[in-house]
Image (cartoon, helix red, strand yellow):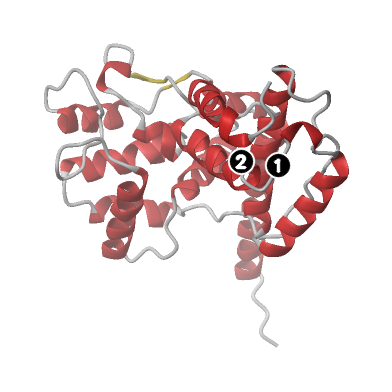
Amino acid sequence: MSRRWSDVEEDFALYLGITYSSDTARSYLHCVRMFGNEVENLSRVTHQDMLRWYAATVHDVARNTAMVRLFAVRCFFEWYRARGGIKKNPTEGIRVRASDDEPTRAFTEHDLRRLLKAAETVQERAFLMVFIHSAARRSEVLAMKAEHIDWERGEILIKKGKGSKMRILSPGPATMEALTLTLAGRKHGAVWLSQIRTPMARATADAYLKRIAERAGVVGASFHRFRTAFGERFIEMDGTLDELQLLFGHSNPSTTMHYIKRSRRTRALRSQRALAERFELTG
């Protein structure tokens, strides 16, 4: 087994492409490439080496970025260990401290209505409705193909979700109708197309949402806020943790619990405001 990054990069990239979504694979490869180019002998990397590397990484970049880099390098060494390149994963035991950042705020119902009202084309409206009602990630929505849609059942197959997990989502008849208008008879290929009729890329999708949000006057729009909003609405409709985990495609229920806590927090604040309005004492 080769001990230099340049000799194993191609094989690792192939593994990522098979195992993860295109966005995750690209991100992980970039992170591991930065790490690997600084290492002379991969088989001699120790746990102490990794502790020092991670401490320096946390110091230099935002915590979430450091976390992604750690997960990427951990993934690499697990792959490298399985191929006999190293006896033990040197990242084992390195813990990621929970972030103190504020959780992603969900779009309010008013926000969502304003976004839909600001949509100027059939595709823009369908694009928004899929995010609002499907609970899918940005990478999953962009990877949607016409042949992945079951029109009779009203279902969308997420064929290459995070961690290469497949699942089925049912976004409702209004969203399916919007998709029908968007595809305009197309039976195959990418659902979402750019202005030059190529599959929509991540940067294009970001700009797409930004333009709609600016027209709608919605500040701080992001794709993850759609998932947060979906999670809160689902819990408010008495959906269970197991059901939400299935829809979100989470491997670990503890990840889904974050959305439960956010929903409870939103309810608590709503009740607090209602109480203040009911017993308004101004002195």
Q: Amino acid at mark 2?
A: Val
Residue 80: % across, % down: 69, 25
- Label 2, label 1: how many angstroms apart (C-alpha)? 14 Å
The residue positioned 50% from the left and 42% from the top of the image is 227
Q: Which mark is residue 3?
A: none
Is label 2 or label 1 in front?
1
Q: Quadrant of residue 35?
A: top right
Q: Point out residue 258 in the picture as x, y percentages from the top left corner.
A: 68, 43
| Residue under the image location 64 percent in, 41 percent down | 36
Q: Amino acid at mark 1?
A: Glu
Residue at x 68%, y 56% (from the top left corner):
63
Question: Where does label 2 land, which residue?
Answer: 32
Q: Residue 102 in the image: state x and y as whole percent.
A: 65, 60
The quadrant the C terminus occupies is bottom right
Q: Is residue 92 among what the camera can see?
A: yes
Residue 219 drawn above or below residue 108 = below
Residue sitting at the far bottom: 283
- 28 above or below 117? above
Report x, y in % for residue 128. 32, 43
Q: Which residue is mark 1?
A: 40
Image-based side of 80 in relation to 172, left or right? right
SS of the residue at dot 2?
A: helix
> For the residue carrying disc 1, how many other residues have a C-alpha within 10 Å: few (<14), some (14-19), or many (20+)?
few
Q: Quadrant of residue 127?
A: top left
Give left or right: position of 65 versus 58.
left
Image height check: is 153 above or below 60? above
- Asked whether 94 or 86 is in front, the reply is 86
Residue 150 is at least partly visible in this image: no
